[in-house]
Image: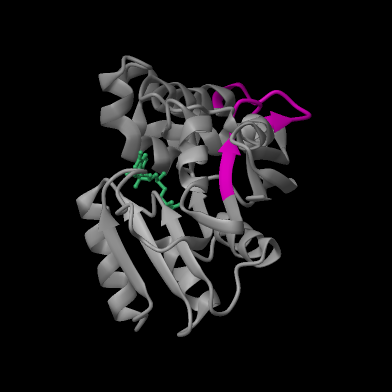
Amino acid sequence: MAGVGGKFTQRLLVDAGIADGMRVLDIGCGSGDVALMVAALVGERGEVVGVDRDPSALAMACQRATEAGFANASFIEGGFAALDAGEAPFDAVVGRRVLMYQREPIESVAALAGRLRAGGLIAFQEHDASIMPASRVPMPLHSLVQGWMRETVMAEGANTHIGFDLHSIVSQAGLLVEEVRAEAIVMTAQQPYPAATIIRAMLPRILRHGVASEREIDIDTLEARLAEERQTAGATYLADMMFGIWARKA
Ligand SMILES: C[S@@+](CC[C@H](N)C(=O)[O-])C[C@H]1O[C@@H](n2cnc3c(N)ncnc32)[C@H](O)[C@@H]1O
């Protein structure tokens, strides 16, 4: 939660206006990182409802909220339409890395806006990998590896350039955009992006989608090969770009 992305999320939530006493929906809450941040921000007078279609992630979110002592957090299994029509409107809807998985993101955001009170807030954090890694010197292995990640999630239906589309999606959903921001994750030769660890975790999916072969990836030597390229290039490079947006319902 406290990583680079977590700090960006925390700032986004605070700057967007998530504050004491608010009732907030966290859509696609996963294992609860964002819901727990929101629970702390809205306090005992507020409430956060996390929704996700993945029951195992939800179970983890529930457990973490209980362990952290957040009585103001609850979790519901389901999709964007999981909540009862009679549910009271929310002051805010938030989500992180979830719009990128929606086939019809404009319709999805519009449906969420229907859950907001008039003047309510929507805040999303997505990312954009389409121009990464960016560096002044060529880093072909890093480019190849980030390409494997990108192509795998694309094969699973994700939009990996959604950051650049966010303003248009949220505006077309009928909301009034207040701010769009982006922040790059900067890596140096001394502070590497854990690309080989991520590739190891994604390996079955990479192979299943035919994105790269086991031989090409050579997972047991990948970290060393990446480290060598970073040392040779002496490079500072951008590994990812996080985008944040917030908007209001008229
Ligand atoms: C990359 S994870 C992000 C989890 C969490 N928001 C975070 O940032 O830690 C995406 C989550 O969105 C959920 N998700 C994607 N589409 C969804 C949908 N239509 N309805 C409910 N959950 C969805 C997935 O199950 C997954 O838990």
Position of residue 116 relative to residue 166, above or below, is below
Residue 209 appears in view: yes
Measured from the top left, where is residue 11 in percent x and y? 66, 63
Tell me if 240 is positioned left or right of 103 in this view: right
Identify the residue at horizontal 48%, vertical 34% (top origin). 100
Measured from the top left, where is residue 106 in percent x and y? 53, 31
Q: Quadrant of residue 205?
A: top left
Residue 133 appears in view: no
| Tally of marks | 0
Q: Quadrant of ligand 1?
A: top left
Task: Please name the colour scheme applied to the rendered image.
Answer: one colour
Measured from the top left, where is residue 56 in percent x and y? 21, 53
Tell me if 56 is positioned left or right of 192 in this view: left
Position of residue 91 relative to residue 185, above or below, is below
**What range of the chain is rendered magenta?**
124-141
50 or 23: nearer the eye?
A: 23
> Is residue 125 located in the magenta-colored stretch of the structure?
yes
Measured from the top left, where is residue 159 in percent x and y? 50, 27
Tell me if 147 is positioned left or right of 11 in this view: left
Tell me if 107 is positioned left or right of 218 in this view: right
Q: Quadrant of residue 130?
A: top right
Position of residue 247 relative to residue 70, above or below, is above
Identify the residue at horizontal 32%, vertical 40% (top origin). 201
Point out the residue furthest to the right here: 136
94 or 87: nearer the eye?
A: 87
Identify the residue at horizontal 46%, vertical 36% (top origin). 108
Position of residue 85 relative to residue 42, above or below, is above
> Is residue 18 located in the magenta-colored stretch of the structure?
no
Q: Quadrant of residue 13?
A: bottom right
